[in-house]
Image (cartoon, grey):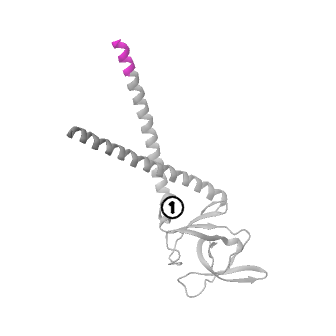
Amino acid sequence: MKKRHIENSFNKRKVFKKAILKIIYVILYVSVLYNILFLINTTISKKEYFKILDISIITMKSESMKPELKKNDLMIVKSYKKNNPQIEDNISYSVNNTIKTNKVFNIQEDNGERYYVTKSNNNYYPDIEKIYDNQIIGKVVCNINILGIFINIIQSKLFTIFAMILILLKISYNKYMYKMKKERRRKKYKNSNIQS
């Protein structure tokens, strides 16, 4: 009875360990795939954020929009097609090669060209920069707390190298195990033919 209990416990640990390893490898594969897509996307579009169709994925870099948007929030930003930004919209835009996210405070015109005055939640005065339509990435439609940390980690070069090394080791290990099983089957078949 005790022996059966120990075997049962051992089998449960083995199954649990396999499940954890599978989850880790799925995360690694997904992160490497994301990095490949991110690299292709940013190389083609010359942008520093991930964009598919009208949806951009951006990480909040500052505390300027607290409590509405916090640092390291992952933001889903939708491009404007027909409608232009409205007052009180949270928009992401590019200014001086930096992506910022602020609230539209005012809409004005300069020589017939519309521009937007933005303001962060934590500043009393609006921002100095004039934001034109061609600088706007889009409207923040959703934010997911803390997930930006995960995105920043998987986009790092060190993590990508580490993940690729682990995947290559896994492939090598699988190849080795396949050869060992094949060899065992061959020996077993050879021994069964000798005994016959």
Vertical comparison of 180 with 8: above or below: above
Magenta span dominant secondary structure: helix
Residue 183 in percent (x, y) is at: 40, 25
User: Circle 1 — which element?
Assistant: helix
Vertical comparison of 23 with 50: above or below: above
Residue 56 in percent (x, y) is at: 61, 64
The residue type indicated by label 1 comes to Ile
Observer-nearest residue: 9 or 21? Answer: 9
Quadrant placement of the C terminus: top left
* Residue at left offset 72%, top offset 84%: 108
Observer-nearest residue: 22 or 177? Answer: 22
Q: Is residue 33 left or right of residue 110?
A: left
* Residue at left offset 28%, top offset 44%: 9
Q: Which residues are magenta?
A: 187-196
Asked if the magenta segment contains residue 190, the reply would be yes
Q: Is residue 163 left or right of residue 10?
A: right
**Looking at this rendering, what residue extends furthest in the bottom direction?**
124
Residue 186: image quadrant is top left
Label 1 sits on residue: 151
Residue 66 in percent (x, y) is at: 51, 78
Residue 17 in percent (x, y) is at: 36, 46
Asked if the magenta segment contains residue 97, the reply would be no
**Looking at this rendering, what residue extends furthest in the left direction?**
2
